[in-house]
Amino acid sequence: MEPDTVIVNGAPRPLAAAAHTTALDWLRGQGLTGAKEGCAEGECGACTVLLARPGADTPTEWTALNSCLLPAAALDGQEVVTAEGLGSPEALHPVQHEMAVRGGSQCGYCTPGFVCSMAAEYYRPDRVQLNGSNGFDEHALSGNLCRCTGYRPILDAARALGHPGLDDSLAARRHQPPPPPPRAQRGLQEVLRLLADEPDALVTAGCTDTGVEANLRGARPALLVPVDRVPELRELRATPEYVEVGAALTLSEIERRLGGAVPLLEQVLPQFASRPIRNAATIGGNLATASPIGDLAPALLALDATVVLVSLDGDREVPLTAYFTGYRQTVRRPGELVRAVRIPLPLARTTAFHKIAKRRFDDISSVAVGFALDIEDGVVARAAIGLGGVAATPVRATATEAALTGQPWTDETVRAAAAVLATEGTPMDDHRASAAYRSAMLGQSLHRLHAEVVA
């Protein structure tokens, strides 16, 4: 494919867009107006499109992404399918047909986004029929909001879907190689040299944070350096000492490739935002932004994880407990990049993640707690507890850990330790929760863990 070209609905188009133009705006400028802007921050899903991305079970997978967050420049050399490319009024795609005949669309504003999220799940290679179900994961629609139709007919449409036929060209495309990485992302050393020369450049991966800053706050960085397709940042490997997760792996990729090997992360990831966000957001980006309310950091703190930073001088490994230095600040130096996260082995035998939020899914935590305990013969041999939402940075609940370690795992111990946990951090009042509520939820989370483990 020629440079600065993108395949849209099967046909090449020249990619010419002004700096900071979103993929959504570029597509709409091409006359593809099905995808729309609803929230401009990846919450509503009206902008959802499909991108061909490297797959786990097939070489290529059709992946649902929020085009309002994605820079148009990221489409260089890539393949995109919009709702218009799935079918036509004369020949509806199976997803479109089911939405139509089951009343899944009323005003229609959100419908193209729902259709694209449904299509991504429709084409998921490992979707199998079980116990009379078509295997459709309804959480694939967790990032799409409907204001007028209601979700019952939309779910009816999803539950009625069959499987792609042999003549389905989009299904066949999955068995071909994925598009190559954009030219700017083909080697880690090239990226590091660029960062050494331009220390003020902003590194981006899935743009789930930088896209919001650009859309809602008008941020216009002078230089963006995308790293989401750099091969050296997309490795996942296990050794006898640790599991290493590449910084540019998306949360969806991590979820599938780990396959439950790290049970605490298996609990966290389904509660992290929505599927289209997890299809873009990366573990490296989540830690690089250093948000005190991110869901991954409390779990990784409980797992005693370390962060591998890389520069032209090589790697250096930093314990996550020493990584955060202040509100959205870290020890990362100019020219350094998060290369990977290491989770030491063996893992604690008792783990849990508690997310306290106004909505169970697709919401920002008021409080997040990650637990990792080893309980031997009824005694807590080791305890690690990570907290989010209660301080300027994610923190370890060290006083509570000390109160638990060496003590019997009993109601009396838990009551005493829960009182300590309620005092950890420096919670504040904001629009999500009061400081008193946050403190109360910390204490309750330990009681909940005890009830779950005892049961």
Image: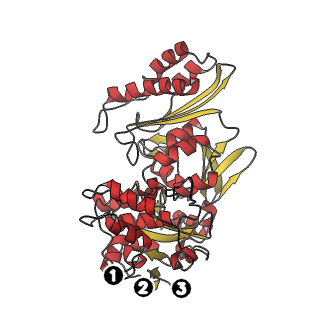
Q: Residue drawn at (61%, 77%), measured in percent from left and top?
A: 176
| Helix, strand or loop at mark 1 | loop
Number of residues whose C-alpha sits closer than 10 Å to that of mark 3, classed few (under 14), some (14–19) or many (20 or more): few
| Helix, strand or loop at mark 3 | loop
Task: Check if mark 2's residue and mark 1's residue have beta carbons within 8 Å.
Answer: yes
Disc 3 marks a residue whose amino acid type is Met
Q: Is residue 179 visible?
A: no
Disc 2 marks a residue whose amino acid type is Arg
Res. 69 mark: none
Of residues 327 and 267, which is closer to you in this image?
267
Res. 13 mark: 2
Q: Is residue 171 visible?
A: yes
Q: Which residue is mark 3?
A: 1
Which of labels 3 and 1 is toward the front? Answer: 1
> Up-down: is 442 above or below 86?
above
Left or right of residue 357, residue 230 in this image: right
Res. 30 mark: 1
Q: Residue drawn at (42%, 50%), measured in percent from left and top?
A: 273
Q: Residue drawn at (61%, 44%), measured in percent from left and top?
A: 306
Kindly report the distance in space between the C-alpha atoms of the residues bearing marks 3 and 1: 19 Å
Number of residues whose C-alpha sits closer than 10 Å to that of mark 1, classed few (under 14), some (14–19) or many (20 or more): few
Residue 378 place in picture, x, y as percent: 65, 19
Disc 1 marks a residue whose amino acid type is Gln
